[in-house]
Each structure stands twice: as structure tokens, then as C-alpha cells.
Amino acid sequence: MIFCKRAVILCIIEFAYNSYVCEITQKGIAMGLSFCSFSSGSSGNCYLIKSETTAILVDAGISVRKILNGLSQTGTTDEQLEALLLTHEHSDHIKSLAPLMRKKNQLRAFANELTWQAIDKTIDPDRKYIFTPGEPFQIGDIGVNAFRVCHDAADPVGFSFYNDGKQISIVTDTGCFKEEMVEEIRNADLLVLEANHDVEMLKIGRYPWFLKQRILGDRGHLSNESAARMLVRLLSEHKKHRKILLAHLSKENNFPEMAYQTVKNILEEEEYYIGKHIEINTIVRDEVSIVYQV
């Protein structure tokens, strides 16, 4: 009898809680942001940002089938999916731009002017939108700001997303950090940060010399060590507990355990500890990740 009474009480509590969540959702009160990676790396990139009512894709460098699979696994509906944002014109970021736009008739595509000029794909002009880096804009209930990064593309950018006082920032495909980039990501609750390669693996690897020089240059990609040094700076200047996802790992010149351990070692040298000061995970290249909530 006591067990039955407890079960009834628990059911009442659960019902009341669910009713409360439903009520605040209907009133439009924001529920924060979530992030999921569908793929991350030189073979293709695609990320999903979601609020309670709005979903945004960042890049479409994998097959439409894989993108649709990611949307299905995350329970993202056509009603939620409003926009596709493009960081730059390289094929591992725009491979499925045109077929995805044909598949998802409601989707709007956003890029800056120079990136659109560099993209050789036929897109319905009524569904093409231009943003200006440094000028915030709104998609549904998510605020967006694009900021320039250092890469060998027409006008490459990273993105920050804002909702309910929370911020997610994405910084990949950059060979260095400028002050305006640091300022942009300073308050991020979740930071998707490139840790592309181990420098020694790259130097002794099979890539031709010109490609090694490109990757190592200021308009190339961040190494594991460079990513770690950036995190040390963030922690020293703004002691905020945040989540870090190491992204865009090279298949040939890196692996998740090495990226994680390199970053961990450098942080600990400066007396910053995972779990105490910061949370760090690595994004698997070709798999749909878990959903990270902030």
C-alpha cells in the first residue's frame, strides 16, 4: 500500500513538472542551446545548433543522406530547421549545399558576400542571404554573429550563437587567432575548437611539402598545441567553467587520444585541470555525436 501511494505521488510530481515545462515552452521562454556534430574533419563538416524552437545547420560538407540521418537522430523537424550557415567555400564544407537546398524547400542559406561569389553552385536567389561579419543577425530565437578567421579561403568565418543568456561558438579552419576572435569566444559556454594535427606527425607524414606548409601556416589549421595555448589564454583572462569540443581532427596527422592528451598536458602545466576548470571532449570524425546542452 505504501509503495502504491509513493508511485501515485511520483506520477503526480512528474505530471506537474511536465505540465510546467510545456507551459513555459508554449509561452516562448527560451530553454538554452544544444550542439551536435554530424561530421567534423577534412572529409566533411556539418554541425547542428538548436534551441527549443529553432534549428540551424552549419556547413553541408557531407552527403545529404548523412545530414538527413543526423537530423533524424536528433529529432529535428522541418518546422524547426530554418537555415544553413556557411563558414567558407571549400568542398568539405559545401559539398551538399545544392542538393540539400533542393531536398529541404524551406531552408535558407546564409554566407557572406565574398563566400557566395566563390561558390560555383546554382542556388535559388530568393533563398540566398548575405550576412556581414561582425554584424549580428537573428534566425528564429537564436542570435548569430559571424567573425573572421584565418584560413586560405575568400572570407572565412566562425560563428557564435546566443539564446537565453547562453553562447556556443565554433572556431575551425583557422591557422591563428586574432584579438577579435579571442574577444568573440571569451564568454562561450561551449566552444567548438579546432585541434587539427600533431605538428610532428604532420612533419614526418606522407603529405607533400607544399601541403604541410599550407596546414602549418597562419592561414591553415590549428595544431593540438596551438588549441591548448588558446585555452590557457582564455582560462587566464576569464576564469569561466566551460565545455570544449576539440574538432576538425586530421585523419592522417592526429587521433582523438593524442589531441585530448596534448591539450590536457599543456593545461596541467599551467595548473588548469579538466573537471575542475574546464570540460573537454573530442568530436569523432564521421559519426553523429551526442547532443551537448548549455
Image (spheres, rainbow, N blue to C red):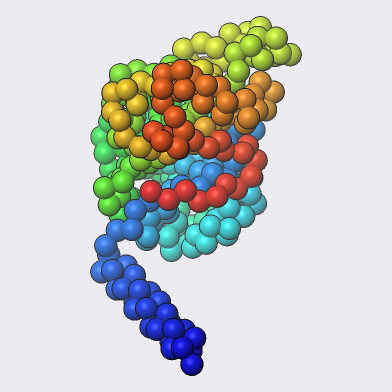
Where is 134 relative to 219, above or below? Answer: below
**Residue 209, located in which quarter of the rendered image?**
top right
Number of marks drawn? 0
Front-most of 152 and 196?
196
Most extreme residue toward the front is 2
Residue found at x 50% / y 40%? 59
| Rendering coords of residue 62 (x, y %) | 61, 41
Q: Is residue 283 visible?
A: yes
Front-most of 38 and 104?
38
Front-most of 11 and 107?
11
| Rendering coords of residue 265 (x, y %) | 52, 21
**Residue 277, located in which quarter of the rendered image?**
top left
Residue found at x 55% / y 12%? 216
Where is 252 relative to 66, above or below? Answer: above
Residue found at x 40% / y 29%? 157
| Rendering coords of residue 270 (x, y %) | 41, 18
- Lateral position of residue 274 relative to residue 131, left or right: right
Most extreme residue toward the right is 206
- Lateral position of residue 82 relative to residue 236, left or right: right
| Rendering coords of residue 2 (x, y %) | 46, 88
Residue found at x 60% / y 18%? 198
Q: Is residue 151 visible?
A: no
Most extreme residue toward the bottom is 1
Where is 228 relative to 276, above or below? Answer: above
Front-most of 205 and 156?
205
